[in-house]
Image (cartoon, helix red, strand yellow):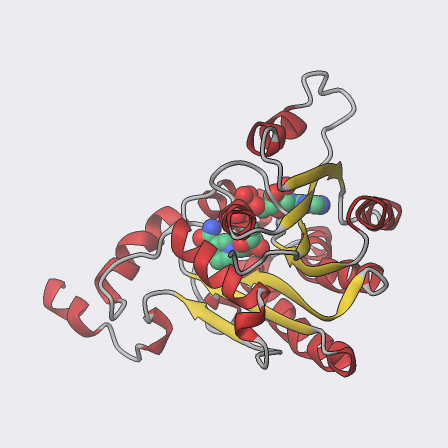
């Protein structure tokens, strides 16, 4: 018996094997879930369809993976199309994972004060507004009692130099989680965020993960970094009935890093 037996879900944000969304989806499918996947569409001139190839390599041959479908969250028609596909292939779903973020690299590299207007708008649209858009489009296909989960980072709560405009987006995302939890609460639908510590992924590298890994190891109470497997465990916890009663929550999966008010044991190394 798996904890997702008979459960169905829509997973967004799988780029490759390192994606946090894949760690969560793989575990949910191991536990019996049937999943549909959206992925970032390939550019029209990319004849090799690399994005489709990457995700298909993971889902092909897994009987629990029911479909892959392109979706760029800046396009409402593509969001609607994924919901149609989900309805046709799975019917209603018990959970939805939002694991999407983007900021133009040139803006991410700048001091926050220098963020461009266009970069800010795009980063906010993809990294924060998309949770609203996706959830709104998904309202009809989410079962009463469904669980919606997004991925966030501590840089939205405190200033984490280097995280810059993405931190501002995460602050908005964290707030959206709470407002959506209120809106959908009457249907028993829960909305939560998993605040993961640094993990080596494509997006993570762009957001300065490499520099953060040593800091977390030195400063987190557990004295180490989290793993993809742990992201899978905490993510499936929040997507499953095991977390019923939890909504509007930002759960920190960070070895306790956010609990520290001083560098603690790290001081001995300075
Ligand atoms: P990832 O690069 O594997 O995933 C990011 C995903 O966002 C990709 O699948 C990408 O295709 C998708 N995406 C970007 N723009 C999109 C658009 N316009 N439409 C649709 N999809 C789009 O990296 P990840 O680290 O797994 O990131 C997933 C989430 O986890 C992000 O929200 C990220 O901020 C968050 N997060 C990551 C870390 C970390 O250390 N890696 C820590 C905390 C939170």
Rendering coords of residue 32 (x, y %): 57, 51
Position above or below: 135 against 99: below
Side (left or right) of 43 relative to 197? right
Q: How many marks?
A: 0
Outermost top residue: 47
Q: Quadrant of the C terminus?
A: bottom left
Q: Is 105 or 196 nearer to us in this picture?
A: 196
Q: Quadrant of residue 268?
A: bottom left
**Residue that appears at 48% across and 72% down:** 251
Q: Is residue 163 visible?
A: no
Left or right relative to 245: residue 73: right
Image side of residue 129 versus residue 230, left or right: right
Q: Is residue 133 left or right of residue 250?
A: right
Q: Quadrant of residue 120?
A: bottom right
Between 127 and 62, which is closer to the camera in this rendering? Answer: 62
- Give the image location of residue 142, x and y in percent: 77, 63
Q: Is residue 158 above or below residue 43?
A: below
> What residue is drawn where x is 84% and y is 59%?
137
Q: From this viewpoint, which residue is outermost toward the front?
A: 1
- Rendering coords of residue 162 (x, y %): 45, 56
Does residue 261 appear in the picture of this structure?
yes
Name the residue at 57% across, 79% down: 246
Q: How far across and down, in percent of the image, does residue 191 sit?
A: 65, 71
């Amino acid at each position: 018996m798996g904890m997702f037996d008979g459960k169905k879900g829509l997973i967004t944000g799988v780029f490759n094997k390192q994606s946090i969304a894949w760690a969560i989806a793989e575990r949910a499918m191991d536990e019996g879930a049937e999943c549909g996947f959206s992925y970032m569409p390939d550019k029209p001139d990319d004849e090799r369809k690399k994005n489709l190839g990457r995700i298909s390599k993971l889902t092909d041959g897994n009987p629990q993976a029911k479909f892959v479908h392109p979706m760029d969250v800046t396009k409402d028609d593509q969001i609607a199309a994924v919901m149609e596909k989900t309805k046709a292939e799975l019917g209603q779903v018990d959970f939805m994972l939002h694991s999407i973020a983007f900021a133009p690299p040139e803006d991410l590299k700048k001091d926050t004060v220098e963020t461009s207007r266009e970069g800010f708008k795009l980063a906010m649209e993809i990294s924060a507004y998309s949770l609203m858009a996706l959830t709104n489009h998904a309202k009809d296909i989410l079962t009463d009692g469904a669980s919606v989960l997004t991925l966030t980072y501590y840089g939205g709560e405190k200033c984490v130099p280097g995280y810059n405009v993405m931190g501002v987006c995460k602050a908005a995302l964290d707030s959206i989680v709470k407002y959506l939890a209120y809106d959908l609460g009457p249907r028993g639908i829960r909305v939560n965020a998993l605040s993961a510590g640094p993990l080596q992924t494509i997006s993570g590298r762009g957001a300065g993960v490499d520099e953060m890994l040593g800091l977390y190891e030195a400063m987190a109470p557990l004295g180490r970094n989290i793993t993809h497997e742990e992201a899978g465990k905490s993510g499936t916890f929040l997507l499953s009935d095991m977390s019923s009663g939890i909504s509007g929550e930002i759960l920190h999966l960070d070895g306790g890093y956010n609990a520290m008010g001083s560098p603690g044991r790290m001081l001995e190394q300075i």
